[in-house]
Image (cartoon, helix red, strand yellow):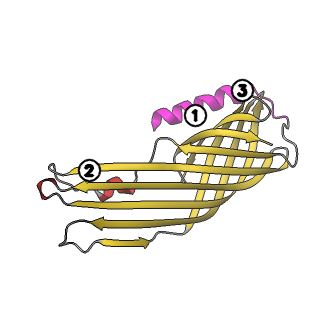
Amino acid sequence: MKKLLFITATICVIFSNSTTLNAQHEKGEIQIDVYHGLPPHTGIIFRAVSSVTPDEVVEVKTLGNLGLRFQYYLAPKFALGIDANYTNRSATINYGLTGFEEKIQQTVIRAMLRTSWEFVKKGGFEMNWNNSIGYRTASWKWSATDPDLTINSDWSGGVPIAFRSALGFRYMFTENIGLNLEVGVLGGALLNGGLTIAL
């Protein structure tokens, strides 16, 4: 975590000291980001299985945080858009000699309205500050093969509101294709990155 923050701060200092703040986007321009959370976040799944004993085997799997961002420039430095992302994580516990298994799985979907303010630009490099708010749903599945347990259920829970505040970086190799990287809190992975397409 400290190393990630140090790298982010270093990038900010290097580019902010050598950039101009001239407008670089036109009103009506569209950007689409496809991204993946780095690293995959297992979160509450690890806590749910933290009490297993040494003779038990735990397998943890994660898909996501997979996301799609769309933004439309209302002004040269300000864009409004949508950030939607998906995460699925699961843990399977094998209870040693008994042969029984227990599985817990969580699926999280978020859809948020997003604002983006671009404050640094040098060549193809851009930095922006983003804030998002919207809807979050989290569903759970819990099952067990032990006939003495009655755990076979689906349920939903948690606060249905999603927030995110993030610092974003984008490097455009051409006018239409580039890479994106974002460091943020809440509303998805701490760090995500992927491909940018400008229209």
**Helix, strand or loop for disc 3:** loop
User: Which image quadrant: the C terminus?
Assistant: top right
Q: How crowded is mark 3: few (under 14 residues within 10 Å), some or many (20 or more)?
A: few
Q: Residues within 10 Å of mark 2 (few under 14, many from 20)?
A: some
Left or right, 158 with respect to 95, comes to right
**Helix, strand or loop for disc 2:** strand
Write down the region rendered in magenta. 1-22
Q: How crowded is mark 1: few (under 14 residues within 10 Å), some or many (20 or more)?
A: some
User: Which image quadrant: the N terminus?
Assistant: top left
Residue under the image location 25 percent in, 75 percent down: 150
**Amino acid type assigned to the residue bearing label 2 in the image:** Val
Left or right, 111 with respect to 25, comes to left
Left or right, 43 with respect to 112, comes to left
Mark 2 vs mark 3: give the one in front.
Answer: 2
**Amino acid type assigned to the residue bearing label 3 in the image:** Asn
Q: What is the x, y in percent for residue 87?
A: 49, 54
* Above or below, comparing residue 120 to residue 46 in the picture: above
Residue under the image location 31 percent in, 71 percent down: 152
Q: What is the x, y in percent for residue 61?
A: 38, 49
* Above or below, comparing residue 40 to residue 150 in the picture: above
**Helix, strand or loop for disc 1:** helix
The quarter holding residue 174 reads: top right
Disc 3: which residue: 17
Q: What is the x, y in percent for residue 151?
A: 28, 71
Q: Nearer the viewer, residue 182 or 100?
A: 100
Question: Residue 181, can we see it?
Answer: no
**Amino acid type assigned to the residue bearing label 1 in the image:** Thr
Disc 1: which residue: 8
Q: How far apart are marks 3 and 1 (CA)?
A: 14 Å
Disc 2: which residue: 58
Q: Distance between the residues labelled 2 and 3?
A: 48 Å
Left or right, 46 with respect to 186, comes to left
